[in-house]
Amino acid sequence: MSIPFDLPADDHTLSPRTGYTRAHWEAVADGLLTAAWRRATPGGALLHLPGRPSRSGVRSDGLEGYARTFLAAAFRVAGAHDDDPHHLLERYADGLAAGTRTPGRDDTESWPEILDVDVQGQPMVESASVALGLRLTAPWLWEKLDPAVQDRAEAWLRGALRHTPAPNNWYLFPYTVAGFLESVGRGDAETAAARERARDLLESWYRGDGWYADGDGRAFDHYNGWALHLYPVLDAHLAGDADALAHHGGRLRAHLDGLSLMFGADGAPLHFGRSLTYRFAASAAVSLGAVTGHTPLTPGASRRIASGALRHFLDRGALTSEGLLSLGWYGPHEASLQEYSGPASPYWASKAFVALLAPADHALWTDTEEPAPVEEADRVLSLPGPGLLLQATRADGTVRLHNHGSDHVRPHEGESAADDPHYGRLAYSTRTGPTARANAADNHLSVEVNGRASVRRRIHPLGAGHGDGWGWAASWHRPVFVAGPTMVPGLRAESVTVALGSLELRVHRVVGAPPGSRVTLTGWATGPEEPTVSALHGLYGWDDPAPEPVPAPQGTAWTPWARVPRLTGGCGGTTVHVALACLTTGPDAPPLERAVTDVRVDGGTVELTWTRDGSRTRVSFEPPEVRHTRP
C-alpha cells in the first residue's frame, strides 16, 4: 500500500533485505509527526487525533497525542544533535507551556492532572513520555524555557510521584519522571523514593532468561521490550551510570536472545499479548541494545529486525490516508485493542525511534544488513523463566510461540471465565492472530461439561527445555466456565507441546472430568485466501483423526474471515489426547497423517516415532518430562 508521505529511494546495497536506511527512519518520523500536528490545538498542548475515545476521555487522549509524539520528536532531534529542520521542539515547548498553565481546567489547552490509577491514571503513563522527551532534548528545549514554565512542568510531573500507579510496569513511569527531575538538578527525597520503589519491584518481577513479569502475576509479552527493559536501560545510559547499565544491560542482552527470534522473515513481530496497536514498538529493545552495546546481535542484524518491523507495517496499511497510525494491526482492527486504547495510543510506536539515538556514523546504520535469526536456520528455543517455547522455520520465515506460562491473570483475580484471546491460547505466531471472543477459539483445548465449554485462564508452568533442533514446554490449568458454576472440583488439564521442525506435537491429559464430558482441540486460524496453511491431525483420544473446519467469521488481524480446524473426543475421569499441528506457508505442508508412527499411550506416558528421521519422543506427566532420542 502507498505511504502518504515521501521516503528516500530504497538502498538495497546497504540494506539488501529491507532497503531502509537511517534516512528512511528520519523521514518516517517526520511524516508521522507532521500528520499528527495537523490535529493540534492552537496552543499545541493537545493533539486530538481521530478515532474512538478511550475510557480515559477526550482530554486525556489529547495529552496522549502530545506526549507520545513528543517522544518520537525527541529521539529524532537528540539523535541528530539538535538538527531540527521542522522546528519540532518549538512546538513542543509551546505545548508544554500551554498545557501546564492551569492543569485540570476544562478549556482548550489544559492538561489533566495526574491522579491515582483508579481515578485519573492515564496521564501518569503520558508523564513518562513527557519527562523522557524533556531529558533527551534538555540542552535545546528545557534549558531555554522560562523558569516559570519549568516550575509549572515540574509541579505537573510530580503528580506522578504522589499518586498510585497500576501494579505493573506503571511504576516505571514515576521512575522515569524522577530520573528526569534529578538530571536537571531538581531531585530530592521524593524522587529518590520513587526510583527506589521501582527498582525494588523490578527486581521482584525478574523471572530469568531476560524476562520480567509485568507485575506480581505471570504476564509476559511485548511490555518486556518496550517498557520493562527500555526505561531502566535508557535511564542508566543517559545518566552514564556504568553499574546500573551493566546490571540492566546484561538482562537486556539475555532478553534479546529470545526476543530477536520473535520476528518473522517478513518483519512481523509475534501477534501476542496486549497493546498490539503499538506495532513496530516491538523492535525498541532490539535498537536499544544496539545503541547501548548490550546485545548479542550484530549491528546489521539489529537494523534488519528493526527496519523489517517498521517497513512491515508501513507496507500493509497501518497508516491512514492522512498519514496517521490507525487503531489496529495493519488497518483498523477492533479485536487487537483494549478498552484503554484511544486515538493516540498507537503512537507508543514512537519507542521504536530510539534507534535514532545511534548517530549517522554508528555501525547500526553503516554496517550492511545481515539476516535476522529466523532467516539463518530452523531453531527451537525454550524460555523456562516465562514458560514460553519458540519455534522458527527458515523455509517460510514463520515464528510460532507456544504459551505455557503467560496468562495476564493478576494475583487478586483468582480464576474467572472471561476468555482473553491475547494470552489464553496455546500458541501464537508471526502470520496469524487469535480469533475474536465471540468466535471459535483457535489453538485452544476446551473441556465441555453438560454442554458448557471451558476457557484457559491462569497458567501453571510445568517445565521447558530444548535440544538440537527440538524443544518442549508444559503447563496445567483449571478449566473454568462462563455459564453455571465457574469450576468443576478436581478438574484439571495438563498440556505439553513438543516442537520439531515445523511440526507441533500436542499432548493433553484431562484429569477429573465427569462422565460424559467432551474435549475439543483447535489449531491455527487461517483465511481461505491466505498462503498460510493450518493443519491438525488426531493421533489418540479423538472421535475422528481428521478435524472439522469451524468458521470464525470475525476473522483475525490477517484475514476478515477465518477457519479453525477442530478435533473432538470423549473424556471422563483421566484421559489422554494426542494430536499433531502445523502452520506453514505454501504448497509444501507436510502430511500429518504420515508424520509419526508407532504411537503408544500407557497411562501418563506417550511415545511415538518421527518418520522424518526415526527419532523417538517420550512424553510423561508424572513427573512432567520430555525425552527425544535419535537412532
Image (cartoon, grey):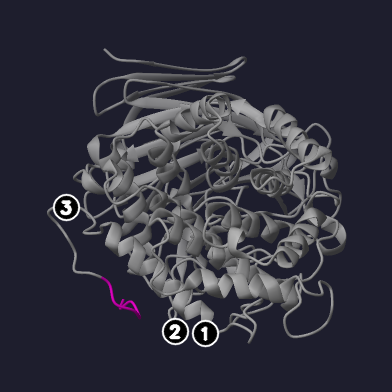
Which element carries disc 3, helix, strand or loop?
Answer: loop
Residue pointed to by mark 3? 16
Left or right: residue 310 compared with residue 329: left
Q: Does residue 244 show up magenta in the picture?
A: no
**Dot in front, 2 or 1:** 1
Q: Where does residue 596 sit, x and y in percent of width and height?
A: 33, 30
Who is closer to the viewer here, 220 or 59?
59
Query: Is disc 2 surrounded by few (<14), some (14 to 19) or many (20+) residues within 10 Å?
Result: some
Q: Which of marks 1 and 3 precedes in the sequence?
A: 3
Disc 2 marks which residue?
Answer: 322
Of pointers 2 and 1, the one earlier in the residue sequence: 1
Q: Which label's residue is closer to the chain start, 2 or 3?
A: 3
Q: Is there CB contact under 8 Å for labels 2 and 1?
A: yes
Which amino acid is tagged 3?
Pro
Residue type of the residue flagged with mark 1:
Arg
Q: Nearer the viewer, mark 3 or mark 1?
A: 1
Q: In the image, what residue occupies the spot 56% across and 24% down?
A: 243
Nearest the camera: 415 or 216? 216
Magenta stretch: give its range. Answer: 1-7
Identify the amino acid type marked 2. Answer: Glu
Task: Determine crowd level at label 1: few under 14, some 14-19, many 20+ residues with C-alpha closer than 10 A.
Answer: few
The circle on residue 38 is 1
